[in-house]
Image: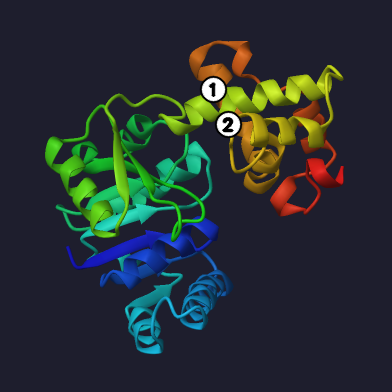
Amino acid sequence: MKKIGVLGTGTMGAGIIQVLAQNGYEVVLRARRETSVQKGIAAVSKNLDRLVTKEKITAADRDAALARINGSTDISILADADFIIEAATEDMESKKALFAELDQICKPGTILATNTSSLSVTEIAAATNRPDKIVGTHFFNPVPIMKLVEIIHAAQSSDETVATAVELVRSLGKTTVEVKKDSPGFIVNRLLFPHMIEAARLLQEGVASVEDIDTAVKLGLNYPMGPFEMLDMGGLDLANSIMEYFAKEFNDNQYAAPLVIKQMVRAGKLGKKSGEGFYKY
């Protein structure tokens, strides 16, 4: 594999583009708007500039990485990519539409990966005529720093597809874990979201404050961030959507978003998107 396609230039997409380009891959990126294409490349450039300032890489390394990146609003830029990673909106119908479109324009041997953090890779794969070549590659934010990537087997994924995804991700200096059975939230979010839900319930019941719950988790469990800090960073609208998805898929209301989170979303207190999460509510 030499040419890797990336769909999406937000925080996750830009991070994935950066690590691919730094590790010698030619990267073709696609976003729906030209402003998004330029914003994604600018984010990568800014991050690489920081690494030069910190003497982590040389100016020549930065320039070489940026030279490997090309972007467009035209999805046909991905037609001859060997492997494509989708890092677009966390919405099932949008992802299925994208994968169906990619299936039509890409080479028969191209592997299509989704960076979904919780949605069914099996359902996404079913939207294509190459379900054996669909796989989940769940990177974590910030991508250049976080070492873990979950590799998710769709029910239809071939062993060769999974092995290729593992090989690519490990070539980026990442550690992989395999999710052998496609299940909502995979490993990390399956464990993380009940933790955040229970924290929200403690707040809702008046047991403790946002600050004290976060402090207790950080100092008592030795976590680097508290649950409310994580909710704010990830975005409360996304967290609410994932919780409701879990509740539906598992048919268990214990996974449903507590009222306090629903109210925050209704009030437009969305964390990273508005800058008004639990710490500014």
In the rendered image, the vertical position of residue 234 relative to residue 252, given as above or below:
below
Q: Residue furthest top?
A: 252
Position of 251 compared to 102: left or right?
right
Which amino acid lies under the numbered mark 2 shown in the image of this protein? Ile
Residue 149 in picture, x, y percent from top left: 36, 45
In the picture, the quarter occupied by the N terminus is bottom left
Residue 57 badge: none
User: What residue is drawn where x is 59% and y is 35%?
Assistant: 222
User: What residue is drawn where x is 80% and y is 40%?
Assistant: 278
The quarter of the picture where residue 129 lies is top left
The answer to whether residue 257 is visible is no
Position of 138 compared to 142: left or right?
left
How crowded pointer 2 is (Cα within 10 Å; few <14, some 14-19, many 20+) is rated as many
The answer to whether residue 23 is visible is yes
Q: Secondary structure at mark 2?
A: helix
| Residue bearing the label numbered 2 | 242
Residue 99 in picture, x, y percent from top left: 35, 47
Which amino acid lies under the numbered mark 1 shown in the image of this protein? Phe
Nearest the camera: 75 or 10? 10
Q: Secondary structure at mark 1?
A: helix
For the residues bearing labels 1 and 2, Cβ distance under 8 angstroms: yes
Position of 107 compared to 213: left or right?
left
